[in-house]
Image (spheres, coloured by chain):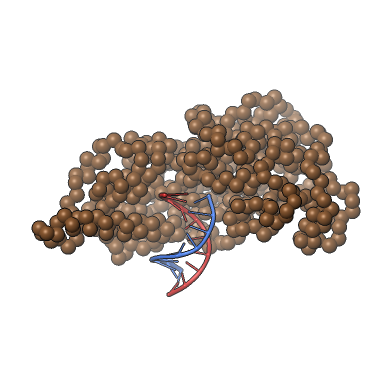
Chain colours: A brown, B blue, C red
Amino acid sequence: MNDLEGNTPCDFKQSLLEHHDEVHSVEFLRKPLSEDKLRNIWQHVVHKAFNARASILSESLKPVKESVVSMLQLQTDDEQHESRVSRDIEKVSRFVDNDHELSSGNDKYPAPSTPQLRQGTRLLDDGDCQEQTNCSTGKESGEHEGESKSVETTCGNLNAESTPQQRKSEITLVREEVESTPQQRKSEITLVKEEVDIVDASKGESVASPHTQKRKVLSNTDRNTKALIKVGVHSDSCEIRGNQKKIKVDWTPELHKTFVKAVEQLGIDQAIPSRILELMKVEGLTRHNVASHLQKYRMHKRQILPKEERKWLNLRERSYCVKRPIMAFPPYHSNHTLPLPPVYPMWGQSGSPTAGMQIWGSPGYPFWHTTAENWHWKPFPGMHADAWGCPVLPLPPPQTPGFPYSQNMPSLLNADAVDHTFTMPQSSFEHYPAEEVVDKVVKEAISKPWLPLPLGLKPPSPDSVLAELSRQGISNIPPKGSNSC
DNA sequence: AGGGAAATAT
DNA sequence: AATATTTCCC
């Protein structure tokens, strides 16, 4: 997918471009990303953070330095400090996550499952919602943001002090080619999302992340599936702040129910995205989301109805003719009490023959009561993607002396963490460094900034360097010997 | 602007 | 393969 090979035949290329006082590094690594490479990268980051003169220490590296400093001051820090470190390691994680994606080619991520959406009926009660309002694609901002094509709004979450642009230029040691595909670009800009999504790449079912701080609330309407409505939120609320791409909406049964209800209420004529959206009163949901869902909904209707209609007509046409198969439905309520099948029929059509009969535009009958609940299809009821994805640092790493991070993430490593982490199939990670490895490597790089910079990677050939330079429009070649960060 | 559907992405 | 998002056209 986002292979670098497309741009350069060589295994990798590395270029160091010096402009004025700052040295920008761009390093292209071949997949898979090895532990050594990763460590190398981070050593460079730390190294630069430490060695750069204060005057030119980029904003983006300051937090790194601070982290290191604070770590070196030993883990006697207070809570505040810890949370800072915690946050920093999250940055690290995020960065690495991104890299994961870039280097793995594994693109199967579970749905993030609507963390940001909140139904009109409060699922949560408290202040977390502040973040919601701030960061979610709210009605006002959401649509805006929907139109904004800005890709450069990258990591505003990394550090409040530095602009996204700054960060990008500094921290992004590993990144895609400039001419990345839209997909690639996306991978760069949706860090937060990635963090959420990256958990379980193997199956598509997501697992609650111990890493992302979130609340899980049992839906009052949920049945035995006990699907979780996660209303996950980062404690560091500014992180997600409105500069991100839309977060994927997970149409949970509840949400879908709300949707169907609105549609039913409006009737076939009025059921247009904006109205539906209005009726649904779901915070953060955008018209686009609704339109999309509506599209799908209609499609299924079309697909299902004619079939059922035909069947029905075949059965009845001889005896008495009924124009529309607004048929007498079997006692739906029975469905309510029935144990659910392990697999949720999508749109309810494959479950019972009538399950999909929530007639489009058949107001008056509350089909959605059942269909909306049964519509969902998550293979494992207990594992509904309500769980947020878990990015890096999924497990309480073995306590590394001098590296207190794992203790600094109470919210990330809460009791739930235990439950969820072990459910993550290892196989998902076989294509890139295990997260523990990443964790370890980053730790090492940060915790031992004094270690000499590894020469590490194979030096680029002069040709490739020159080519890269010219490709980027750099004509004046920096003097030799200045190739350190 | 916004609805709808096709094209894409995940 | 299914679902969600993005893009495009009207």
Any part of residue A234 in sight? no
Quadrant (top left, top right, bottom left, bottom right) of the C terminus of chain A: top right
Query: Residue A92: in sight, yes or no?
Result: yes
User: What residue is shown at x 22% (from left), y 58% (from top)?
Assistant: A310
In the picture, measured across the screen, residue A1 lies left or right of residue A202, that is right
Q: Residue at x 68, y 52 (%)?
A: A4
Q: Residue at x 79, y 43 (%)?
A: A458
Label count reads 0
Q: Is residue A198 shown left or right of residue A253?
A: right
> Please, is residue A184 above or below residue A485 in the view?
below
Pick the front one: A296 or A47: A296
Residue at the outermost left position: A319
Left or right placement of residue A474 versus residue A377 in this view? right
The answer to which image quadrant residue A63 occupies is top right
Query: Would you place residue A380 above or below residue A362 in this image?
Result: above
Q: Is residue A244 left or right of residue A127?
A: right
Residue visible at 35% across and 53% down in the picture:
A259
Displayed quadrant of residue A323: bottom left
Expressed as whole percent of the image width and height from the top left, the position of residue A420 reads 50, 32
Q: Quadrant of residue A292?
A: bottom left
Q: Position of residue A201 (x, y in %)?
A: 53, 41
Q: Position of residue A73 (x, y in %)?
A: 74, 30
Task: In the rendered view, tell whether residue A141 sits above or below residue A105.
Answer: below
Front position in the image: A132 or A308: A308
Q: Could you tell me residue A116's position as x and y percent?
A: 48, 47
